[in-house]
Amino acid sequence: MSERPASGPRRPSKGERTRARILDSATELFSRSGFNAVSLRDIAAHAGLTHAGLLHHFPGKDSLLIEVLERRDRIDAQSVFPGIAHPGTPEPGPRERLRRLIGLVARNSATPGLVALYTKLSAEATDPGHPAHHYFKERYRVLREEVTVLVTALRAEAGAAAEGDPAVVAGQVLALMDGLQTQWLLEPEAVAMEELVRDFLRRLGLDPDGGAGRPGVSG
């Protein structure tokens, strides 16, 4: 009796493929024109669907926006913090996670539309009535926690004492990354985001290529 062929990855269903197409279209249009300037009919037309067909998968633009943001974060988490995306998944070592975090900065340099979308929405979402308010509030809470754990792990791995509360350092790193994105959007040729983040980390004693140690000492 012949052996059954090993089963490969599950193929997405037609509905899943349609949802993915809608999300791709929404991401492109939101990034290009902004959230408020894009209608559900625009997204449906771009995805090759009717307005009713899109509503079958997403009840409104607010829910579609949140799914666009969450999908991007899931992709990022799978790289830097896989334990968030898939609880129980082994995570790479702290120095490798730091390199991957910096890698996101480099990747963002190639996606100005999406960076602009996040920057604009995060500012708008400070309004408690904004549809993405809870999303961004929770996103920053999780990021602060994860980067705090990462800073603590880097220091422990190096076996050297370092100044500063890890939670404060985490807040500083995230603030730097967000602030640089705004400056880069205004004048890309004048702001080398990745190099500036690397320099800041080295000044904190968190060299992605040489371990952790005393602030101001780079490897």
Image (cartoon, helix red, strand yellow):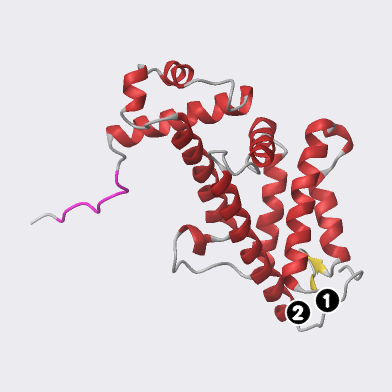
Side of 15 relative to 156 (left or right): left
**Residue 210 position by quadrant:** bottom right
Marks 1,2: beta carbons within 8 A: yes
Q: Residue furthest right?
A: 216
- Please tell me which residue is depicted at 63% across the width and 55% down the height of the picture: 140
Sequence-wise first label, 1 or 2: 2
Residue 107 included in the magenta stretch of the image: no
Classify mark 2: residues with Cα within 10 Å, few (<14), some (14-19) or many (20+).
Answer: some
Residue 53: assigned label: none
- Please tell me which residue is depicted at 44% across the width and 60% down the height of the picture: 86
- In this figure, which residue is indicated by the disc labeled 1? 213
In front of the other: 183 or 80 = 183
> What range of the chain is rendered magenta?
3-10
On screen, residue 95 above or below 185: below
Side of 191 relative to 67 (left or right): right
- In this figure, which residue is indicated by the disc labeled 2? 158
